Amino acid sequence: MNHRKVNQFNLLFIVLLVVTACASKPTTTAISTECIGSFQDFAYTIPENGLPYLTSETLPPEPWQFEEVLPSSNTNGSPLISAVATTRSIDGYVEIWINRQPYGSTYEIVDAENYQYLIYRDDTNKWDVVSAQVEDSGVFVDKLFVDRDGSIWGRNVWDDSSAITSKPILSRYNDKTKKFVFDNSVQNIPALWKDSDPSTVDIPFWTDVLLDADGEFWLFAHTDAIYNYNPDTQAVKRYVEITDFRIKQVVLAPNGTIYFRRYDDYNTAFSLQEGQLFQFLPETKKIESLDIPSKRWPSFGNILVDRQGRLWLDTVGWREPDGTWNMIYPNPWLYFWKMEWEEDYRWATPHVILENSDGRIWYEAEKGMAWLDPTTMQGCWFTTHQSSLVEDSDRNLWMIADGRLYKLPLNP
């Protein structure tokens, strides 16, 4: 525990708040046979050893459908992890692209064969495997984007300790050769920034990339600028300077606004801070800092903008487009007590990862995955496995659990 000096009155006040919060904490009763527990169980409690729903792993239950086992890997001994990256509709069928790479990846060329994309066809149930390496170089694709004509694009990264100094931040997948190829039109956009401070272990900051509904890329180069790239015209525009910013995450709103979170080395207050969230308006080329609530809010890991333009901060709450804040965290003082005083970091919030087409918000954490229906504020903790989620053009959700691909049909 932190040994902080507080007067007895303040300490008693905090203790009373925590006791009240603990007494009113959410029930652990499952809301249906499809759920391990409720969304409240998942988001606002810490399961202790011995609870029945954590004595064994729980795979995604019905209506999730098992689809296929992932192909075996030709690993050289490095443990590999797999994550659903994207989907695309092509020639009447759907492809599901799955990123597979070594755990704790540093993109070393000696592991080149283990950086792959598995491609699953939903019509034939067949797999294909392509390399994530770009043009047989020491550069690899770590994130995928699908443009309006179905072309696959990738963000490029590499071993930042290697001799590679500058490569284009984007590459494009060639369907004929089944290889990623550099897009040299973006050669002058910085791909990487590294802190020269040895105390930070030279953490690499790769340029953040978004693809908007018009098929144009927005690239946030740390401590440099925000760029726009039109692949059709190959025109690159330097929009606005961000020389004082390192970016934690960028998300695109339905109206074209881009929200981003500023990187902070240490948030010792464990709470939402002034100057942490920003809004970039491409039409006016302005960056505006978002006003934060007067009430102290717990900190968060991810942000997401839903179809109504609400900015979600994990399981803490959301901001309306008009600037109104709505907290859903039931006992914030319990969070602050656990995180700030007891230093029990298991109480960190689950991460928001997706809004699907029926409006549900999906989350992942070490304990598994859950969804929340914002209209009813009810949800379901449905698996103990963690996975990325993507939705295809036929309204199917896809995820991976225990080396297997699962599908959730959303159409009635």
Image: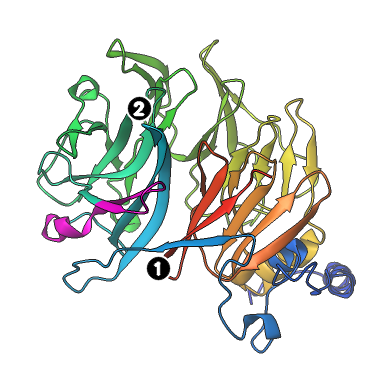
Where is residue 131? Give x, y as percent: 20, 49
- The residue at 66%/47% (across/down) is 361
Q: In this view of the protein, can residue 101 be seen by the observer?
A: yes
| 250 on left or right of 238 | right
Residue 23's place in the image compared with 71, above or below, is below
Q: Which residues are magenta?
A: 109-128
> Which label sits on residue 289?
none
Q: Are the residues flagged by discs 2 and 1 in contact, CB closer than 8 Å?
A: no
Residue 164's place in the image compared with 152, above or below, is below
Label 2 secondary element: loop
Residue type at numbered disc 1: Gly
Q: Quadrant of the C terminus?
A: top right
Instruction: Answer few, some or many: residues within 10 Å of disc 2's Cα (few below 14, many 20 plus, some between 14 and 19).
Output: some
Q: CA distance from mark 2 to mark 1?
A: 40 Å
Q: Quarter of the image holding residue 40?
A: bottom right
Q: Quadrant of the N terminus?
A: bottom right
Residue type at numbered disc 2: Asp
* Residue identifier under label 2: 224
